[in-house]
Amino acid sequence: MSTALRLEKITPDNVDAALALRVHPHQERNVSPVATSLAEAYAFGEPAWPRLIFDGDRLVGFLMAFLDIQWAPKRDPDDRRSGLWRLNIAAAHQGKGYGRFAVEAVREEIRRRGGTLMYVSWEPDEEGPGDFYLKLGFRTTGETSGGQTVGVLDV
């Protein structure tokens, strides 16, 4: 991992590269493809925060945050949350610190917007990213979302 890491918005110039990004085949059942995430970003509008992760000129990943979404309006209309919605690190670039960079970038954006907690959810299976998130300091909340384990991190 270099010091030239940065996030970029998805634009007409980089959308094809974003759509071509692939995780390891065994991870495909645990994370949606970038195309699905971009469709959701379009549908959700402002609360979705999709970004590409570059190391220099090389695209290494994709992330999408959710910022200040009303989490459970039927139970608690004041429960607004922000966090990491998607994280796709290209298969050839995993294990190099890009995922950690992505989590920290979302954490900083939430902090910048005045948030104090960062949420994430993951598939609770052996090949899911649970250990990765727990090593970064996330703790489970006891909640599930769509069958996924929900974790939280102090910002």
Image (tube, helix red, strand yellow):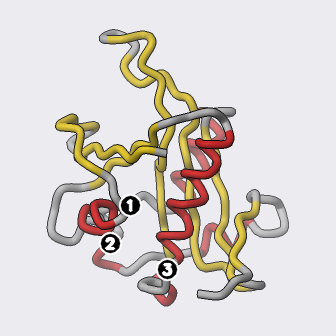
Three-letter amino acid code at disc 2? Answer: Gln
- In the image, which disc is placed on residue 64? none
Q: Residues within 10 Å of mark 2 (few under 14, many from 20)?
A: some
Q: Residue at x 21, y 71 (%)?
A: 127
Q: Residue 12 is drawn in which quadrant?
A: bottom right
In space, the residues marked 1 and 3 are separated at their CA atoms by 18 Å
Label 2, label 1: how many angstroms apart (C-alpha)? 7 Å
- Contact between marks 2 and 1 (CB within 8 A): the answer is yes
Left or right: 12 in relation to 33: right
Tell me the mark number nearer the camera, choosing from 3 and 2: 3
Identify the mark at residue 97; answer none if there is no mark.
3
* Residue for badge 2: 27
| Coordinates of residue 150 in the picture (x, y in percent) | 28, 43
Of helix, strand and loop, which one carries label 3? loop
Give the residue type that dot 3 points to.
Answer: Gly
Residue 83: % across, % down = 48, 43
Mark before the other along the chain sequence, 1 or 3: 1
Q: From the viewer's perspective, is 29 left or right of 126?
A: right
Q: How many marks?
A: 3
141 or 94, which is in the foreground?
Answer: 141
